[in-house]
Image (cartoon, grey):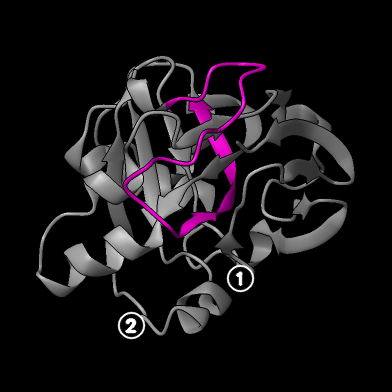
Amino acid sequence: MKLICIGRNYTDHIEELENEKPTDPVVFMKPDTSILLKKQPFFIPDFSDDVHHEVEILVKINKVGKYIDKKFAHKYYDEIGLGIDFTARDLQSELKGKGLPWEKAKSFDGAAVIGNWISKNIFENINDIDFHLEKNGEAVQRGNTKFMLWKIDELIEYVSKYFTLKIGDVIFTGTPAGVSAVNPNDILVGYINDEQNFSIKVK
């Protein structure tokens, strides 16, 4: 399986990091070794002093597809989830400043949280899903899929131009504003429509 991640898909997050608004989705990858194992804590890596949480809606691909038209994209996933794209922001800034790839800042071991999967059929509208992240009981990120610059089906169409999508692949669809550093003993709890989806302890 592969993890396909979308950057800069919410205007408020683009603005908070003072990035340029892209003309196409920003795509990067995480290896399966970056998946945080269930019931395991997230350990802040020793190479960063500024790891940020980025909560995101996830989509799990259910069949093989290439050059998928947007109007057929809904047939390629049955489940929606929630996760975190952990980012070593200090390392990312250094790499970006040198014009280098982001992988060391985004794809290290444990950098991808994948919560519980939910049937998409429970949602009235895939493009109107509320989600949020609480840190130590306080909501720090809030988002809704209606504010995505590129919606889920558009992302599947775009990504499948470049990568064959396979069963079990996961798309991280981008994060809203509110990203911030995590510290030891933080508790991160993610919610979709106010239903708890995951809980992670930071060490």
Residue located beneath label 1 in the image = 177
The quadrant holding residue 185 is top right
Q: Does residue 88 sit above or below 80 in this rendering?
A: below
Residue located beneath label 2 in the image = 20
Depth check, front residue: 51 or 4: 51
Residue 56 on the magenta segment:
yes
Residue 109: x %, y % from top left: 37, 29
Residue 45, label in figure: none
Q: Residue flagged by tag 2: what amino acid is it?
A: Glu
Q: Which residues lie in the magenta part?
A: 35-60
Q: Residue flagged by tag 1: what amino acid is it?
A: Ala
Residue at disc 1, secondary structure: loop
* Residue 131 visible in image: no
Q: Are marks 1 and 2 in contact (CB under 8 Å)?
A: no
Q: Does residue 17 sit above or below 8 in this rendering?
A: below
Q: Is residue 38 left or right of residue 89?
A: right
Q: Earlier in the sequence, mark 1 or mark 2?
A: 2
Q: Residues within 10 Å of mark 2 (few under 14, many from 20)?
A: few
Q: Is residue 152 left or right of residue 25?
A: right
The image quadrant where one finds the C terminus is: top right
- Of the two numbered discs 1 and 2 in the rendering, the one whose residue sits closer to the viewer: 1
Depth check, front residue: 27 or 161: 27
Residue 184: x %, y % from top left: 63, 44
Residue at disc 2, secondary structure: loop
Q: Is residue 168 left or right of residue 145?
A: left
Residue 117: x %, y % from top left: 68, 23
Residue 193: x %, y % from top left: 85, 46
Residue drawn 59% across and 64% down? 180
Number of residue marks: 2
Q: Does residue 145 sit above or below 116 in this rendering?
A: below
